[in-house]
Image (cartoon, rainbow, N blue to C red):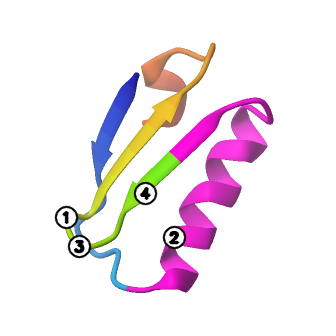
Amino acid sequence: MIEFEVKNMSCGHCVGNVTKTVKQIDPGALVEVDLPTKKVSVQSAADRTTFA
């Protein structure tokens, strides 16, 4: 599991953009976003550095 903090994420549109971007890198990734804490968890076969 790869975890990130997205400091400026503030709305559903932001969540959609983050999810879309992760899916462009790895279409099979599972993405969980916790908007109140601004945390993104990604389960992916791709390396963490791929998402940096």
Q: Residue at x 49, y 35 (%)?
A: 42
Q: Is residue 8 left or right of residue 32?
A: left
Q: Is residue 25 above or below residue 15?
A: above
Magenta highlight: main SS:
helix
Sequence-earlier tag: 2 or 1:
2
Residue topped by disc 2 = 15
Q: Residue 15 magenta-drawn?
A: yes
Question: Are the residues at dot 3 and dot 1 in contact (C-beta closer than 8 Å)?
Answer: yes
Between 42 and 46, the residue placed more toward the observer is: 42
**Residue type beneath disc 2:** Val
Question: Are the residues at dot 2 and dot 4 in contact (C-beta closer than 8 Å)?
Answer: yes
Question: Are the residues at dot 2 and dot 3 in contact (C-beta closer than 8 Å)?
Answer: no
Label 4 sits on a secondary structure element that is strand
> Disc 3 versus disc 4: distance between alpha carbons?
9 Å
Quadrant in which residue 50 is drawn:
top right
Quadrant in which residue 16 is drawn:
bottom right
Q: Is residue 4 above or below residue 15?
A: above
Number of residues whose C-alpha sits closer than 10 Å to that of mark 1, classed few (under 14), some (14–19) or many (20 or more): few
**Residue type beneath disc 4:** Val
Q: Is residue 47 left or right of residue 9?
A: right
Q: Residue 33 magenta-drawn?
A: no
Q: Which mark is residue 45?
A: none
Q: Is residue 35 left or right of residue 14?
A: left
Q: Which residues are magenta?
A: 11-31
> Disc 2 versus disc 4: distance between alpha carbons?
7 Å
Label 2 sits on a secondary structure element that is helix
Q: Which mark is residue 36?
A: 3
Residue topped by disc 1 = 37
